[in-house]
Amino acid sequence: MKQIAGVLTRGHQVASRPSKDYPYSTLEKQKPYFKNLGLDLYPYFNGTLNISIAPLIFRMIKPEFTFEKVEWTDLHPPETFSFSRCNVIFKSKEYAGWVYYPHPETKKNHFQNQSLIEVITFEIPNIQYDDEVELEINQDEIKVEVQQTG
């Protein structure tokens, strides 16, 4: 496992609750599909943490799970999702979870930059935007590097 520093940032706020784009929590709607495909996310908080690792970027290279073209909503075409185990460390306490990666090539809404890692984990008491966290990722599944410019 590789440990990287990150900062909790505001995401699109569609995973945890209804929004202007979705009349439901997207993660709540997706969980039954993922469970049927072999990944049970029901024990985890019904939302994602958006962790900025800037100036670093990441790429999924060999995730533990990849689910192709999941038809979880009728609001847009199917999406592909990948998942890799991770740990979030906040105030010296460790929380197990999953890096949640909706593949950008199948995700037409809510573009995420390559420095933002979405994580599904247990509820973390008192965590707030701009809090610093450590993220432990599996280097065999996720590559982290400095973004090349120019």
Image (cartoon, rainbow, N blue to C red):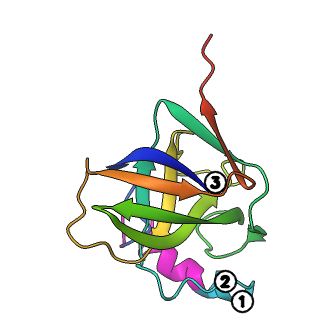
Identified at 56% across, 82% down, the residue is 41
- The percent position of residue 91, horizontal first and vertical second, equals 27, 61
Q: Amino acid at mark 1?
A: Asn
| In magenta segment, residue 26 | yes
Which is more toward the observer, 24 or 150? 150
Q: Is residue 139 left or right of residue 23?
A: right
Which is more toward the observer, 143 or 12? 143
Q: Is residue 49 above or below residue 58?
A: below
Tell me the quarter of the image containing the C terminus.
Answer: top right
Give the main secondary structure, helix, strand or loop, of the magenta stretch.
Answer: loop
Asked whether the residues under the numbered discs 2 and 3 touch, taking CB atoms below 8 Å apart as contact, a structural biologist would say no
Q: Which mark is residue 36?
A: 1
How far apart are the alpha carbons under marks 1 and 3? 21 Å
Q: Tell me the crowding category of disc 3: few under 14, some 14 to 19, or many 20 or more residues within 10 angstroms, Cα based.
A: some
Which residue carries the number 2 mark? 33
Identified at 57% across, 68% down, the residue is 98
Residue 114: name its quadrant. top right
Q: Nearer the viewer, mark 1 or mark 3?
A: 1
Q: Pick out the residue farthest to the left.
A: 126
Residues rendered magenta in the picture = 17-31
Identified at 43% across, 44% down, the residue is 5
How far apart are the alpha carbons under marks 2 and 1? 5 Å
- The percent position of residue 62, horizontal first and vertical second, equals 79, 56
Which residue carries the number 3 mark? 107
